Image: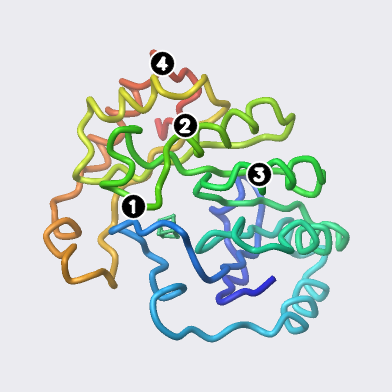
Amino acid sequence: MIFAGIQKSSLVDYPGLVSCVLFVPGCNYDCFFCHNRTLFDGPHELLNLEKIRAFLKKRIGLLDAVVVTGGEPTLQPDLVDTLRGIHAMGYRVKLDTNGSNPDAVRKALQSGECSYFAVDYKAPAARYTEICGPAADAGKVQKTIGLLQNGGVPFEVRTTVLPQLQESDLLQMASELPVVPRWTLNRYRRPEQYKPCDEQRVDAIPWTQEQVDGFARQMLTAQPNMNLRN
Ligand code: SF4
């Protein structure tokens, strides 16, 4: 498995635990608002795997968990072996995915190496390609979420509330999924790097945190486990 970035310590990427975050390069989606575009557009330096292993060994007892994120980790063929290696050091392992590869998520689930999953549900199904690019397929994401629903491992769904999403879109999204154990809405932040053709979209005025919180409350009827801030 290859990694292109590391955040040595995070308090927010694994709920309730101190984690190290490893970023893989490459993604099969093309979300205009992506904050990790440098990981798949243009040259990026790959990290030395031995150094990562040595770092994780040194932090045993200081860090609780490792989060494997991207880019899109499920594109990497040796994902499960890598998760196993991290788990074997005693870490809890969280896998972040865009949900596009249900087969890879099934393998990760069956391996028993992951203790938490996070899946993005980025738009109503009918707007998925508009928001995430031509390769995006909401049906596959829904299949991934269905697998996790029956997988016996904690997981959460996450959505960045883009300026382009209206309350009606969020209510539609809430109705498109089974009741999930946790669903977090995140406020949109303008990315530093984006494609010139997306300038207008990235510059749109974000919803305020209060508005995002209001959307989450509106979604409670269909999704009672919304992760509310207050
Ligand atoms: S799925 Fe995630 S990493 Fe991939 S393009 Fe979209 S925001 Fe970026």
Residue 203 image position (x, y, % from top left): 14, 59
Q: Amino acid at mark 1?
A: Pro
Identify which residue is drawn at 72% across, 34% down. Answer: 153
Q: Are discs 2 and 3 less than 8 Å apart at CB?
A: no
| Residue at the front extreme of this rendering | 134
Q: Nearer the viewer, mark 4 or mark 3?
A: 3
Residue 38 image position (x, y, % from top left): 41, 75
- Where does label 1 land, which residue? 134
Identify which residue is drawn at 53% across, 44% down. Answer: 99
For residue 218, side relative to residue 137 (left or right): left
Q: Nearer the viewer, mark 2 or mark 4?
A: 4
Disc on the earlier residue, 2 or 1: 1
Q: Amino acid at mark 3?
A: Asp
In the displayed structure, 135 sits above or below 184; it is: below
**Cα distance, mark 2 to mark 4?**
13 Å
Image quarter of residue 55: bottom right
Q: Nearer the viewer, mark 1 or mark 4?
A: 1
- Where does label 3 land, which residue? 103
Q: Nearer the viewer, residue 171 or 208?
A: 171
Image quarter of residue 161: top left
Number of the label disc, if any, that sits on residue 222:
4
**Cα distance, mark 1 to mark 3?**
20 Å
Label 4 SS:
loop
Label 1 SS:
loop
Identify which residue is drawn at 23% across, 28% down. Answer: 167
Q: Are discs 4 and 3 less than 8 Å apart at CB?
A: no
Number of the label disc, if any, that sits on residue 45:
none
Name the quadrant where ligand 1 sits: bottom left
| Residue at the top extreme of this rendering | 221
